[in-house]
Image: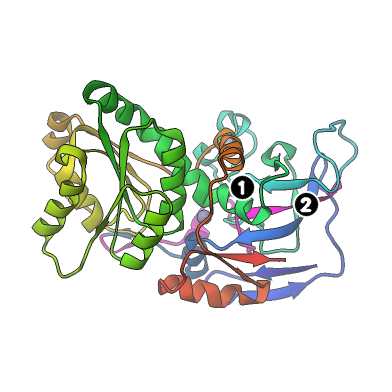
Amino acid sequence: MKRAEIPAPKEKMVIKSYDKVPDPPAGGLVVKTTFCGICHSDVHMADDELLLGGGQVLPVSSLPGFTFPAVFGHEIAGVVHSIDSSVDDDRLKVGDKVAIYPWTGCDNCEYCNKGDGAMCPMSQPMGCGRDGGFSEYVPIKRRDIVIKLPDCLRMDVACMLCCSGVTGYNAVQKVKPTIEYFLNLKGRATLLIIGAGGLGLWCLQTARATLPDGVKIIIADINDGKLRMASEHGADDTVFWDSKLSEQELIGLTKSKAVDGEINAIIDFVNSTESTGRSLQYLTKGGAMALVGLFGGAMSVPLPIFALSLQKIFGVYVGSLEQLKELIELVATKKLTPPDLNYVSLEDVPDVLAKLKKGQIKGRSLVKF
Ligand SMILES: [Zn+2]
Ligand SMILES: [Zn+2]
């Protein structure tokens, strides 16, 4: 069995071979990985730093449960390889095609029992602390986080739903009540998505598939090539944030794309000082803004604004087990399409991480086993 390991914080990733495939943990199973997505958070983890803004840096290895050697990779789809037979449960069998909900915590609290491990104070996701999917075989203790895939869903598509997909879906569900409020009241509403990368494109499609008709969805980015992809994936309009434009021109341009100039909801996959600061200039009174990106940065905002503007601003981080199940059904039945995919080998992962850091990866890279 081969897997890609980081021996210690900030050390280089190495491929290690083991003679034996692991046995299933008590009550659990082993999944043979077919595809594992490479996510931008793998870059933060390999660098062992998350930039918090204002010069603050959080070493990722200091998070609870983070152990070394670390095996990253949290977007895992594969086939059930072996099951511990001591538990009487015929829901899964050897050979089933599955995706794994990686956002586990202590496995022992109210949040974990409800399938909301991201809320657990001891959040320690697979591939981000616990061993993940940059490995030919993945042992899993909890069967309930292993989701059987519909036959019609491709496994390369399914793996991405575990992180980028479910994050975008969660963000859409969080702003949906606000969008429905404006739509019912005024007969129109506009959602702005910031960032047309892999997350933004999944979000765009799940927004299109789960928001009512009549919502205008626009998407902004600093890269016009990515915006062309967004148009192909169903955006009603795009906003090119050209670096040559002044701040006031960018704000004016973005507002001009909304129906009646009103942006009622924003999902920000960048979440930088610039993008979020700009959003506060055009988010309408009573609007909702989901901050998702981990770009880093800080802001100073007069506090009475939040009371007077009635705006709702909240953070979104991944999603729940239930949401991942809903999303898998949605993508399978509505045939949502993935961003451009490129397939790499386990040995290519360090190189892909270096390119991701420089913004040189178009679409999404997946390890194909
Ligand atoms: Zn991710
Ligand atoms: Zn917990």
Question: Which region is colored magenta?
Answer: 54-82
Residue corresponding to mark 1: 102
Q: Is residue 128 left or right of residue 254?
A: right
Q: Report the residue at 55% width, 40% height from top.
A: 334
Q: Is residue 63 part of the magenta span, yes or no?
A: yes
Residue corresponding to mark 2: 79
Q: Quadrant of residue 307?
A: top left
Kind of residue indicated by mark 1:
Pro
Image height check: is 98 above or below 346? above
In this rendered view, identify the residue nearer to me: 61 or 204: 204
Kind of residue indicated by mark 2:
Val
Q: Residues within 10 Å of mark 1 (few under 14, many from 20)?
A: many
Q: Is residue 358 left or right of residue 107?
A: left
Q: Residues within 10 Å of mark 2 (few under 14, many from 20)?
A: many
Decide which of tag 2 and tag 1 comes sooner along the chain.
2
Q: In which quadrant of the rendered image does the C terminus lie?
A: bottom right
| Mark 2 vs mark 1, CA separation in Å | 16 Å
Image height check: is 67 above or below 26? below
Q: Quadrant of residue 33?
A: bottom right
Q: Report the residue at 51% width, 48% height from top.
A: 165
Q: Is residue 139 left or right of residue 350?
A: right
